Image (tube, helix red, strand yellow):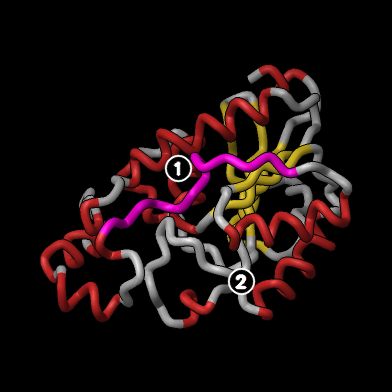
Amino acid sequence: MSGAAGAPRRIVLWRHGQTAWNLADRFQGQLDIDLTDTGRAQARRAAAKLADLPPDAIICSDLRRTRDTAAELASVTGLDVTYDDALRETYAGDWQGLTHTEIRERFGDQYEAWRRGEPVRRGGGELETEVADRAAPVVERTVEKLPPGGVLVVVSHGGAIRTTIGRLLGLPPQTWEALGGLTNCCWSVLGESVRGWRLLEHNANSLPERAIGDDV
C-alpha cells in the first residue's frame, strides 16, 4: 500500500440517515427512498463531527438517501461529492419494499437460509460477494489517489458497507456477518497499515482517537 510508507490514510464508511422504511423494518435495497426529518438532522450532526477529521474526498452512492446525507458534509467542508452507482445497497429483487414479516411469509425457506448466514440471492437479487465486487474497487481506486495521511469518506448503505469492509480487510465472506450493523448516520473507520487495512472504529458517532498501547 503506497501510503503506508508515510502517514497512514483512512477510510470512513458512513451510513445514510434515517428513512421511513428503516422505521418500518422494510427492505429498501436499491429503491430510492428519502430521508426523514430526523434523518436529515442526523446527517447535519454527523457532518459537523466528520468535518473535523478533515476529509480530503467524498464518494457516495447515487441514491437520494445517501446523496442528501453526503450533501451535509459537502456543505461544511466545501468538497465536491463524486457519485457512483457501484456504491448502492444490495439489490434484493422481490424482497425490496417488503417488511421482514412479509418476506418470512412469502419467501420462508430463502429467508431462513439467509438468516443462517448462507449465501442467498435475496428475492433473486445480488449475493453479498457481488456487492463487494462492485463497491470495494471504487473505494480502493479512490483512496489510492489521496496523499499520505488523507481521509476518504464513503457515504453508502449498511449492507454495502459491511461487504466492503469485509473485502478490504481480507475476511472470508462467511465471516462478514460478524461485523455488526451500522446505526443510521454512524460510521466505521479503516486505517492503512503495513499489513493492509485495519478496522479502527465500528458503528461510531464520535471521532476516532489514537489507540495507545493496544498490543500490550
As helix, strand or loop, the secondary structure at mark 1 comes to: helix
- Of labels 1 and 2, the one closer to you: 2
Residue sitting nearer the eye, 173 or 98 = 98
In the rendered image, the quadrant that contains the N terminus is top right
**Label 2 amino acid?**
Leu
Residue 116, quarter of picture: bottom left
The amino acid beneath tag 1 is Gly
Q: Position of residue 80 (x, y in %)?
A: 79, 42
Q: From where the camera sits, is residue 127 visible?
A: yes
Q: Is residue 72 left or right of residue 61?
A: right
The residue range painted magenta reads 81-93
Q: Residue at x 72, y 22 (%)?
A: 3
Viewer-closest of 202 and 151? 151
Q: Is residue 170 above or below residue 44?
A: above
Q: Residue at x 87, y 50 (%)?
A: 77
Residue that appears at 74% across and 31% down: 8
Residue 35 bears which disc, if any?
Answer: 2
Farthest left residue? 109
Q: Are marks 1 and 2 in contact (CB under 8 Å)?
A: no
- Quarter of the image with the C terminus in it: top right
Residue 58 image offset from top left, x and y in percent:
72, 43
Relative image position of residue 145 (x, y in whole percent): 72, 23
Q: Is residue 141 magenta?
A: no
